[in-house]
Image (tube, grey):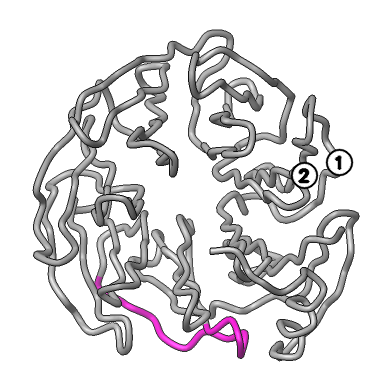
Amino acid sequence: MKSSFPRRTIACVFVLCASVAIAHAEGPLTLEAKIALGPVAGRIDHLAVDSPRQRLFVAELGNNSVGVVDLKARKLIHRIVGLREPQGVGYHQSTDTLYVANAGDGSVRLFHGPDYSEAGRVDLNADADNIRFDAATNRIIVGYGSGALAVIDPEKRIKVRDIPLKAHPESFQLNAKSSQVFINVPDARAIAVVDLTTGQQKANWTMTGAGANFPMAIDEASSQVVVVFRNPAKLRAYSMDTGKVANELNICGDSDDIFVDAKPKRLYVSCGAGFIDVIDAAGAYKRLARIRTVAGARTSLFVPELDRLFLAVRATASEAAAIWVYRPTE
């Protein structure tokens, strides 16, 4: 959902709600705040947002917990504990339910939005990972195991179908204009293209000259699938229609997330090497800025309706575990 307010208006409203404002600008991104997560040890994985409440969910994999951050007050307000290596998180607004995918036991745990009490469980039995919501069919899609997407009915709260893949899926993205889903399958050195209506794989784009394709985003305006590789550190944009490479650029190392900011036509890539790369995607790709962060901070989430990029920073000897809040600048 796009906001009807201009970017500067949103920024002013957001800053007034902040308890701490840093306002440290580095070209196209301004670091506004650092929201402390408290005693969180180890790796932090994916993020999700409840936009109506302005709450951010943080998969604290190494802590076996999910942190709930109030973005208005900019503070941690709740922690869901007793999980098993939570990786994927996703919020389903119409049922007001938080979904948490656990790598440790393969379960997808459900929690009520208002108070985060337990609301159910779907057992996938192995390495439950990324979560996406298919608005066209009102289904929750979860990547898991040695190669499958699970399709979950959010009303009945049961798995209704499996879509087999050649290996474990990493990031996958749904095309809003069709029934296609594009899936990174790094162990198969490929991108799988699947029709969600039929559950059948339509194409298999073999990767050459690069491997470990983990992050992915869809650039709807250019009809491209944008993928980031870790070995070597490289970004490529593929035509949705043909699978041919349309753009390529060297990128920061150990990337885990990429997002499209449609208004200024930019890409944000967060990397465990300790950087965010900001890419001009208006034509031939070029890097606008390389912003220093913290080693290991490779997970992020861009929320267009809040006009903010949230970066998950794990605890180190010099940094406390926190969410760093960035505001895009014109």
Q: SS of the residue at dot 2?
A: strand
Magenta segment: does it hold 52? no
Residue that carries the numbered disc 1 in the rendered image: 288
As drawn, is 166 to the left or to the right of 311?
Answer: left
Nearer the observer, 270 or 260: 260
Graded by Cα atoms within 10 Å as few (under 14), some (14 to 19) or many (20 or more), the crowding at tag 1 reads some
Q: Does the rendering let one see residue 313?
A: no
Q: Amino acid at mark 1?
A: Leu
Contact between marks 1 and 2 (CB within 8 A): the answer is yes
Percent coordinates x, y for residue 278 in the rendering: 77, 44
What residue do we see at 90% from left, 54% from top? Answer: 27
Residue that carries the numbered disc 2 in the rendered image: 278
State the image quarter where residue 186 is shown.
Answer: top left
What residue do we see at 73% from left, 77% from top? Answer: 10
Q: Amino acid at mark 2?
A: Val
| 78 is higher (above) or lower (below) than 193 | below
Q: Which residues are magenta?
A: 70-82
| 48 is higher (above) or lower (below) than 203 | below
State the image quarter where residue 180 is shown.
Answer: top left
Nearer the observer, 299 or 294: 299
Percent coordinates x, y for residue 320 in the rendering: 63, 72
| 109 is higher (above) or lower (below) than 76 | above
Per the model, the C-alpha gap separating discs 1 and 2 is 6 Å
